[in-house]
Image: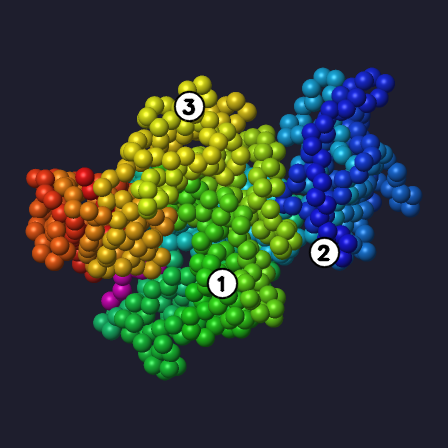
Amino acid sequence: MKFFRTTISILGMVLLLWGCEQKQVKLLPVQIIPQPRSIDIQEAPPFLLDKDIQVFINDSSMLPAASLLQDILPVNSTLAWYNEEIPQTGFLLQLSPELDSLSREGYSLQVNEKQVGIRSAGPQGLFYAVESIRQLLPAQKEVPANTVLGLPAVRIQDAPRFAWRGMHLDVSRHFMPLDFVKKYIDYLALHKLNVFHWHLVDGIGWRIEIKSHPELTDWGAWRVVKEGKKPWQDFEIWKPGDERPKYGGYYTQEEIKEVLAYAKERFVTVVPEIELPGHSEVVFQCYPDLLCQDHKGKSLKNIGVYCASNPKSYTLLEEILDEVIELFPSEYIHIGGDEVSKSNWKACANCQKLMKKEGYTPHELQSHFVNHFDKYLKEKGRKLIGWHEILEGELSPSATIMYWGGEKGVADNLSMGHPTVLTTGSHFYFDHYQSLSKEEPKAFGGYAPLKKVYEYEPVPDGLDKSLKNNLLGVQANIWTEYVPNPQHAEYMVFPRMAALAEVAWQAEGTKNWERFQNKMEALLNHYQALGINYAPSAFRPDIQFALDRESKRLKVTLETELKADIYYTTDGSEPSPQSGTPYQAPFWLDASCTIKAIAVKNGKIINKPETKEAILHKAIGTEVELNNEGYGKYKAEGGYTLVDADFGGDKWGNGKWLGILNRDLEATLKLDTLSEIRQIKLSCIEETSAGVYFPAAIEVAVSQDGKSYQTVQAFKNERSLPIPKVPDIHTNTFELNFDPVACQYIRVKAQYQKVNNQGVFIFADELMVE
């Protein structure tokens, strides 16, 4: 259809002289996020915002859009009602059933000299049209003297690609204040997102008042603060009378009603999550009698999983869900369902009896539990949605899936035939790192920079057309293990929420990264005006190395995701616009050095210098043979990873580290010629809570013919056992020195650290030879 064609021409910033007073008229470029379906810029006078303006409506459902419009306009406005006669001036809001093909969230926006016409088949579309108008205006409402703001003459027709456009917020691990929850909903509306997935319950915090079970918040909303430990380590609920410090909070039912009313006015659906059958440690600290029991009647360890054979488990959850359903009008109720350990069920006498009676496997027992609540919710007129692990066993066909796995598993998940929302973990987990800089605050792991989020295509290539209807939409998640407060949450979410909005809204196949980059500058101004603590990560210079194997020179590329000027030095000094070299194109290094780079925008330095060591050692680009390959997605570039002069930094999951599981790292290097060496360095990383450990020992042997080897140095990493499991990341370069020796072959063996009952990784990113 004609309105799906996107007009390419974009209006730039102009300053015009207009009217008898010769005031300057300021027009902004038409740059809207998410990108509309069509933009047709007219060669006609603008609509001037130079006097009081009327906003015309004829239905009370238009009030949210009208109220937002009055709030964002830089001039005084009055609300006026019209009946039969259609006004010809001011802002005109109309409900137009003939635009139903655009959906009730789509809209038509037409600006001319006399009027701004806003039309939609539903009040949602009118609201989203106003959000587009916001981006046609400067971020600040104050207008300089002798300046009049104007809206350019433009025709926009727009509609969303997906019905489900969501953002998640985990308030269990770290509680977020009520005011911030409302602000978060405002942020969703700003980006035309329409689902707020409120993660109210998890293993270490219960955040929703349940009147029939007050212990859940009297005790379960508070945890004992234990110095030196993360919230989930040695978790213990706090009870009145305990003199130890506490942390927590919860939302009363009245506060939840307040949030729901607030969200309704912004056309955001709030989907609550109540965890079952796992992630519920807090519940069993409140009600220990609900734990599974062994054959002797002894309670099993609290692993956060409901006893699937205990009728009291079902009764408790039904009573909880009854109150949740009474509060939340959403079609869907999220029940979690992920990462459910079956170990207690296998040891529980009554669960064993149930499995034997019904012929269940442990996975099918999980389905038995989940399907009970699928049926229960259906009887209440609601729908169950859960994380994709609920597919284990025999899931009810009516259940809806929220898929959080990697990109490669999307097609297989959709082929299961369930309605699905994609929260693809490789791209849409906003608790992952936004850049590879050491300046980034501690995050959960993973790597999802702005461009990676933006370029994600939810529909896999070759997906059968019949399966596309299963895809309800997309959502990004933010888990708060390392996000202690609203300011940090904003840092992790912005500006990636803008990229999510484009994926969720704009038409398939129309994304354009350069256009998005250009639009982001104006949106960042709006973020600043709204006081949003957005991350500068997309402006951090990424220093990339590429080794030329023949010349053994290193190609250096500097780039930022969002546009900025880059200045750098190669002598280790601090760069500035005055002292640094302006980056124009990639350059080459033939000797080791320290590169530092900064980004500059509008004359201001945005970031602390990014630093990367270029180490051109004797083994760069040589042949490498590995005895054991990297595990899974941690193969990096195989053995070449150890000699490519490209260090992985402090994030072991970024694809630049070679990770070997439960085996030693043994690499044999073949130098180009017989050479004299005296030193070996091995760069490693450690995060013990993730099973990544420094090597227990390192041995270096050399040979001239590749057959007969001589050990020249050995190192044993003496550590007190057991090694504490902590989420802190450390890097270290292990240096082994020895008397100069002539060789062509070097064999380095790094022994992995053995830990009882646990898989252990050894990660390395460079093996330096001098």
The image shows residue 480 at horizontal and vertical percentages of 42, 45
From the viewer's perspective, is residue 557 above or below residue 628? above
Left or right relative to 291: residue 700: left
Q: Residue 339 at what x, y percent from top left?
A: 38, 61
Question: Which residues make up the magenta segment?
Answer: 298-304
The residue at which mark 3 appears reads as: 580
Q: Do callouts 3 and 1 mark residues in contact (Cβ within 8 Å)?
A: no
**Element type where label 3 sits in the image:** loop
Mark 1 is on which residue type? Answer: Val
Image position, residue 548 (x, y; %): 35, 44
- Residue assigned mark 1: 410
Mark 3–mark 1 distance (CA, rounded to whole Å): 46 Å
Question: Alpha carbon of mark 2 to alpha carbon of mark 3: how far?
Answer: 53 Å
Q: Is residue 229 visible?
A: no
Give the label, 2 or 1, closer to the camera. 1
Badge 1: how crowded within 10 Å, few (<14), some, or many (20+)?
many
Q: Name the secondary structure under disc 2.
A: loop
CB atoms of marks 2 and 1 within 8 Å: no
Amino acid under disc 2: Ser
Residue under label 2, please give it.
Answer: 103
Residue at 60% over, 46% down: 512
Where's the N terminus, which quadrant?
bottom right
Question: Can residue 657 be seen?
Answer: yes
Q: Nearer the viewer, residue 322 or 578?
A: 578
In the rendered image, residue 599, in percent from the top left (x then y), is placed at 46, 29
Front residue of 218 and 325: 325
| Magenta stretch secondary structure, dominant | loop
Number of numbered discs overlaid on the protein picture? 3
